[in-house]
Image (cartoon, rainbow, N blue to C red):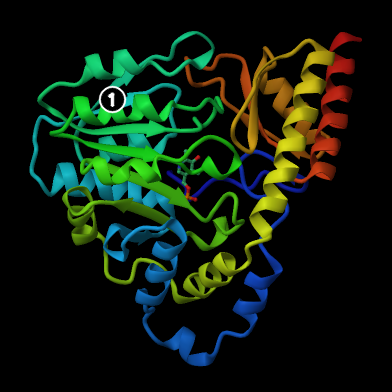
Amino acid sequence: MVLQGYPSPGEGLRLHLNENTGGCSARVLDAIRHARPNDVSAYPQYREVVDATARYFGVDPDWVLLTNGLDEGILMAAVAHIAKARVHDAETIIPQPAFDPYPNSTAAVGAKAVWVPPGPDYAFPTQAVIDAVTPRTRLIFLNTPNNPSGQLIDPDDLARISDAAPHAVVLIDEAYIEFGGTTFLPRLHRHPNVLLGRTFSKAYGLAGLRVGVVIGQAQALDPVRSVTLPFNINGIAMTAVQAALADTQFLPRYAAQVEESRKLVYAACERLGLKYWPSAANYVMVQVGDTAPFVSAMAARQIHVRDRSKDPTTPGCIRMTAGILSHTIRAIEALDSVMAKRQA
Ligand SMILES: Cc1ncc(COP(=O)(O)O)c(C=O)c1O
């Protein structure tokens, strides 16, 4: 049986899904508490939130599509540009390691995934991605910073790929860009084939409410809007997004903690002789060797991390969220204890 969602890891600190470990802004909860009965009984209205989101990102509202998490945006991009376009021999290009919804959405619309392996230490394989472009390429999934490696793609390389595949749509997934790196946003007006993906799940702490944003010019975005169901996001989530956008202090505070947390994780890895990759996101990928006993030993200490070893490009690796400092300190205590037991 295929279960809906992911199984609960049980009690303990959730450091396995790159969520905001500090929760959402208090202003978001306050706005939800003040919802009126008709905010629930009426179908949701999106115009105001689309306008607020567009102002926030400094783009025209016509360039903005709110989705049920960026996950929905990824699937709908594939539906619009492959399934609805009735392209039967379509290919998508997926640089590795990759976020699962890219191959899953590719498969859902009957397209073929063309995988591109990473360079040394997960350096982004720009030329290999360009070399993989064919007349059948319809979608190219680029993720900066990369989940799980935390590596960035140079905006010049993103532009080169977009220019090399004008017949395809390039989806630049910036789900974690608030934690480091330079957004492609200011360059979007020169790239009509680019869709930029953002989310309120990570830096803004709204993963449970499911709101993502796809930003792009009409050529790339209108087909996606046309296949997206009219009431795709619930009204309470819209209230939450308005409040999250209004709380300008929440994000910088959390991002500062993430930066400190990453440094603590790096220091712990260096002390313990574990290989890690410096990350621009709110998580760090660490090579621990035999992952299954490591992940269970951490879980026994109430720290849940993600096993990434099934991906052939990340053997022996786990990924751990680096969020609120006190949580990271607890995670490092568990890491120390697991490693001490291993050496005993
Ligand atoms: C790279 C990447 N893109 C997109 C998402 C989807 O985010 P959401 O659907 O919660 O907006 C995630 C979530 O883990 C992610 O890691």
Q: Name the quadrant containing residue 45.
A: bottom left
Please indicate whether residue 200 sits to the left or right of residue 128 in the image.
right
Residue at left offset 38%, top offset 15%: 125
Q: How many marks overall?
A: 1
Q: Residue at x 81, y 42 (%)?
A: 325
Q: Is residue 165 above or below residue 250?
A: above
Residue type indicated by callout 1: Arg
Residue topped by disc 1:
160
**Residue 304 position in % (x across, y down):** 71, 37
Does the rendering let one see residue 48? Answer: yes
Secondary structure, mark 1, is helix
52 or 210: which is nearer to us? 52
Percent from the top left, x then y, of residue 306?
A: 62, 32
Q: Is mark 1 within 8 Å of ligand 1?
A: no
Quadrant containing the C terminus is top right
What residue sits 55% from the left and 24% below the top?
149
